[in-house]
Amino acid sequence: MDYMEKYKMWVEDPYFDEQTKLELKNLTDEKEIEDRFFKDLEFGTAGLRGKIGAGTNRMNVYTVSLATQGLASTILKRGEEAKKRGVAIAYDVRMYSDKFAEIAARVLAANGIKVYLFDGIRPTPMLSYTIRKLGTISGIVITASHNPKDYNGYKVYWEEGSQILDEIADEILSEISKIGHYKNVKMMNFDEAKDKGLIEILGKEIDDQYTREILNMAINDENVDKDIKIVYTPLNGTGNKPVRRVLKERGFNNIIVVPEQENPDPTFATVGYPNPEDTKAFKYARELGLREKADLLLATDPDSDRVAVAVMNDNGDYTYLNGNQTGALLVNYIVTQRHAKNDLSSNAAIVKSIVTGDLGKAVAKKYGVTTFETLTGFKNICAKANEWDITGEYKFLFGYEESIGYVYQDLVRDKDAIVSSMIIAEMAGYYKNKGMSLLDVLENMYSEYGYYAEKQISIVLEGIEGQYRIKRMMDDIRHQPIMSIGEMMLKDTIDYLRDETDAGKSNVLRFFLDDGSWYAIRPSGTEPKIKIYIYTVADTKENANEKIELIEKVVLHRIESVN
């Protein structure tokens, strides 16, 4: 069927509810109809993510139910034990998150699969923790992470507590393709499923266990200035209670929460785009921090798996750390402190994505810690930890990527802003006790390892034509790479789609220059963007930044010349 036939089927089929039909009937722009129906919302290793609304290319109760039936069929093939182990489900503050979570629970229950559903909003990392704690076969979290308010998503996890990889995703996709009409999805009444014990509600007990285990991950509890003043914003998301609780129970009593962004708000009215990677998200936190003269600003994204940091500088304002800088600081703190305590195993390893900078890698090398690189996404980073659980070859110490995601040790198998917030607060308090800020520490690292600079550029290209243009951009530079930028010559290229690498296959191009600089280009897996990552290293900060500007100018000119 073409998009218009699909549209008419949704409007006329009695299976679809009247509210859905009314929404579709009120559409007057054929381009909008086309965008909603020209394809099915793609199920990949990130599960589903898209705009909320009626249509096959939207997040709604029908697309969620279809995906869940595919997951249910995948679990059923693994027998009675898998059914009994069940599926944990968590959800965030976004519009319809609770509704989508309930629909998923009802579909699984109708298939005879046990469901553990949280009694309210929870951070994404707590879903990973719960899978590992309860030993479920799978997990679902309803979230669109840091996307704008009109988005939602559906992420699937497997028994290790990490997001599914291609093998399981392909299996679920295959099962989805067999379902046919939405009416073939099984569905059970929610109260009936609870009465039959197929849906169990999770609450405070899991919260308490999670908090206790995080507190046990403290590296230093002495020589830490716990009076350090921190302004924290959960950006109206799920982080408010768990982050504050962990910091309070660690003894950090000087935590000030941004009042306008404290409580859940699916419209994100005070921030618009709730991505703490964007410094504009810190507007309220900065204003409060300046009034309170706070040492540190912390912001977690709506599902609280990512955290960003800003540090008071010598000019009485805040310097915003990017994900590479925070990641390198965390590597430095964890490795040096564990080394000082003789608590660094000989086979310790850190894992970063291929588009993450190399400063943390340089620190790790000094202390004999191995660095591994994976494709973008914590499903790939944590896959290494899953592998080492079996082989015992390495001990997973820390994983991170430039997009402000970090995980310490193996309490969870995903990025975790609650654990990370605690370690960041501890780290900042430890150095404050020594009369240093995190900016001072970073400067010392640059002096020792070289001045690393980085910049990420995103070009947003929405809709069908945007997708096609992104493809043309990738094809153009793949087949005709830029041979020189100023005095920097192209030394090597890795095409992760076509070359054999340890990292795996993905549509990512990485270009290495002869001075140690490099840049990478890839389409976003979750948003209508093409992303460019630029990294340089030099003997001075000025030289490193000059190289960034030059590479940016040349690469952007080339990319944007492709129509």
Image (cartoon, helix red, strand yellow):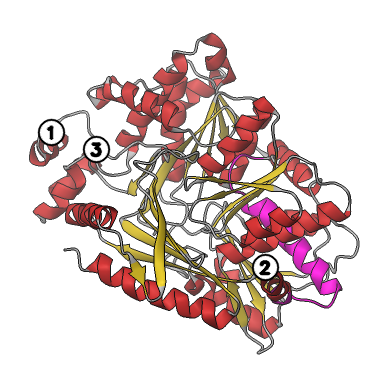
Marks 3 and 2 sit apart, C-alpha to C-alpha, by: 48 Å
User: Which is in the foreground here, disc 1 or disc 3?
Assistant: 3
Name the foreground residue: 160 vs 28.
Answer: 160
Residue 348 forms part of the magenta stretch:
no
> Residue 454: horizontal and vertical position, in percent?
50, 69
Residue located 40% across and 44% down the image: 153
Query: What residue would you read off at disc 3?
Result: 40
Q: Regarding mark 1 in the picture, which secondary structure is present there? A: helix
Is 298 positioned to the left or the right of 495 in the image?
Answer: right
Name the foreground residue: 136 vs 408.
Answer: 408
Residue located 56% across and 36% down the image: 383
Q: For the view shown, which residue lies furthest in the bottom direction?
A: 315
- What amino acid is found at the position of numbered circle 2 in the picture? Tyr
Marks 1 and 2 sit apart, C-alpha to C-alpha, by: 62 Å
For the C terminus, the quadrant is bottom left
Q: State the mark number for residue 9.
A: 1
**Rendering quarter of residue 210:** top right
- What amino acid is found at the position of numbered circle 1 in the picture? Met
**Rendering quarter of residue 284:** bottom right
Is 209 positioned to the left or the right of 454 in the image?
Answer: right
- What amino acid is found at the position of numbered circle 3 in the picture? Asp
Image: magenta residue range: 412-440
- Specify which label sits upstream in the sequence, 1 or 2: 1
Q: Is residue 116 visible?
A: yes
Residue located 86% across and 65% down the image: 224
